[in-house]
Amino acid sequence: MPQPGADELAGSITLAIHARRLTLDDLVTRIADGLGLSAVSVPTLLFELSRRTVSATIMIDALDESGVAEDNEEHLRISEELLRPLSLTPGLRLLVGGRRETLAGLSRHVFHPVELDRGTYADPEDIRRYVAGILADRGDRTVRAVLVNGIAHRAGASFLVARMIVEAVNGGQLDVDPSREGWVRNLPTEAAAAFRSWLGRFGDREPLVRRLLTPLAYALGSGLPWDHVWSPLATALSGRRCVDEDVQWLLNHAGAYIDEVTIADGTTRFRLSHDELSRALREPRREREAQRRITKALIATVPSQPDTGRLDWANAHPYVLAHLATHAAAAQEIDDLIADVGFLCHADLTSLLAALNQVTTTAGQTIAMVFQAVAVRHPDDAAAPRRTCLAFEAARQGASDLLAALNRDLPWQVERAMVTQDHGYRAVLGVEPAAVHLQCVEVLDRQKLLTSSNSASLRMWDLTSGEELDSLGDLQSPGVPAFATAIVEGRPVALAGGLDGAVQLWDLISGAPGAAWPGHETAVNAVCTTTAFGTQVGITKDEDGVVVAWDLNHGTIIATIATSSRLSPMACLEADGREAIAVIDTDLTVQAWDLQSGELLGALCDGRHDIGLVATAEVDGRRLLLTVHLDGVARLWQPGARAVQASIDDLSSEVTKMGCATTTPEPLP
């Protein structure tokens, strides 16, 4: 909950969302639809919300149940990329419910925690009144009071457990006799045990109830549709035939813990009312096998084309197109699924992109690279344009088998496509105005791209989707040509240097700026960070070649070095066992300066090739020097040894900025 202001909540919720099984993109869609906005991504949602003149209160419950079941990462992504910037939006109140550990990061930084199961909010009398209300018509008042107190005691702070105990008591599955000593100890205290007691009420039909509820434990998004999907999944998971009439019986007689949800297209989805019930029905040791059966059963629901016999993905159920990729990835069968180009052309783009991160085979990786390239350039294409774009990209990348499969249903054949010198892995969209500095940074355990420009702002981008995540507002400087990142007191920060010579520190989690530090008489053109003098140090250099070392914990100057470099590239590294800075001198060679003494240490690599850019990269625990030369080659050096460790030849175009990050087991420059 964002920090409350002087006024209290008016008592109304503009939009309430239950986040169970929802992804970040699902939440963006729900919020946009609920508030009448057209946004389709986090950046566009934030932009449209910032221009609303009407205040709103959004409640998001069950954050800990978001994403695919057994996925412990989606709530982190939602918290970092959506909830934090939403909480800073003027006119918007945000209430978020979830388990304590799920909300810990939000509570530390921009949210005010209200612990409903502790302190003044955790009143045992609430549970007692809840139980008493359900048992209001049960037997003798005195006996009922004893029963209510016993159930409330065992349920603790859980309304779910209290409800399930009462259901089991009313159904006769729990034998309770308040006159018998120790009867309370026979009552369950956890949801799983209470759920088992509740299931017992169905006698010889309990196995059928379990078979029909189990598919709901694996359901994604808003839940399972009844038609064509629910009963086939129940059959696949149990090995016993289930039909639609069984589902109808379940809803009529055992639907107490099933939620019915109407989605945007007017159809109905069904899901379990709480994730605790899902955990009670799933078997972690058989998770992959269960997902394999689900994947196979969902594919079996897809009709065949009468003329070719191939699967007719155009007429597959919407649940299949939206979530099959996620199930297949969990089953470790995504490589086989994406070999069917019909599925590539019709599947939901967002879920398929996420699933492609799980491919393992060479063929799967080739298909993934082609699809990812098309998805970045053409995110909104329908099936027919997507097939054409995939064919061109397959030809461009030389993926002949994929191209042949795609060509099969095209009205004309793609034989070849012009191959440009493109070594890019994934495009970052919309960097406007043109970035003058960039750096990869880890924020809340996720890799981001931070960019600056000659406008007074820093912008953060997602390296997977290419979308803008955040803008760190207006800096006090009129422009930010350079910055670097560091960890100060356990938090990621950006040290930004301005055109006016000022230096400023920014918190990358909260987006909060620090005070501007005066230290340069001319524009700052380079910034780097390191650990030296027993503390975190920021290094800034201006257009006159003056280098200033800052204590980032206190904002004080600890060293000043007058170099002869007027060029902007600079890097921190270790040379001859000493902390040093590397700058490009006027003769386009890399020179090292001792950070503590200010002494010139000399050239770090040979001078046979003029150098235009310099950076450092961590490789196998060593800090190496990365240079980009005017001859179009990037080279990796051991500082001082003047020996090239690796190189990237024939860069496709002029490189103006570079950074390094570990996005795979190998460092990618």
Image (cartoon, rainbow, N blue to C red):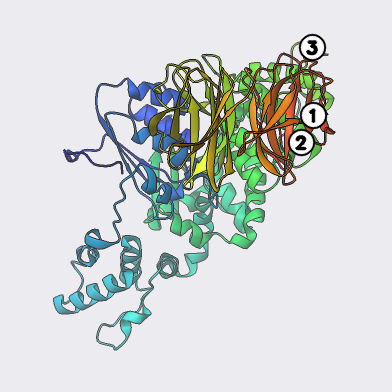
Which residue: 44% across, 59% down?
Answer: 276
Q: Is residue 310 visible?
A: no
User: How many numbered marks does the figure carry?
Assistant: 3
Q: Determine the CA span between mark 1 and mark 3.
A: 37 Å
Q: Amino acid at mark 3?
A: Met
Q: Name the quarter where the N terminus is drawn.
A: top left
Quarter of image, res 255: bottom left
The image quarter in which residue 240 lies:
bottom right
Question: In the rendered image, which residue does mark 2 sit on?
Answer: 639
Q: Alpha-carbon neighbours of circle 3 within 10 Å: few (<14), some, or many (≥20)? A: few
Q: Which mark is residue 418?
A: 3
| Residue count near mark 2 (Cα–Cα under 10 Å), binned few <14, some 14–19, many ≥20 | many
Q: Residue at x 65, y 43 (%)?
A: 328
Foreground label between 2 and 3? 2
Report the amino acid beneath label 1.
Cys
Q: Earlier in the sequence, mark 1 or mark 3?
A: 3
Q: Quadrant of the C terminus?
A: top right
Task: Pick the residue in front: 583 or 593.
Answer: 593
Check contact, mark 2 vs mark 1: CB within 8 A.
yes
Mark whose residue sits in front, 1 or 3: 1
Q: Can you give x and y, in whole percent of width and height, for residue 128 in the image?
A: 22, 67
- Where does label 1 land, which residue? 605
Work out whether residue 257 or residue 550 is closer to the camera in this orientation and state it.
550
> As displayed, is residue 664 above or below residue 234?
above
The residue under the point 53% across, 19% down is 481
Taking 417 as reference, is 178 left or right? left
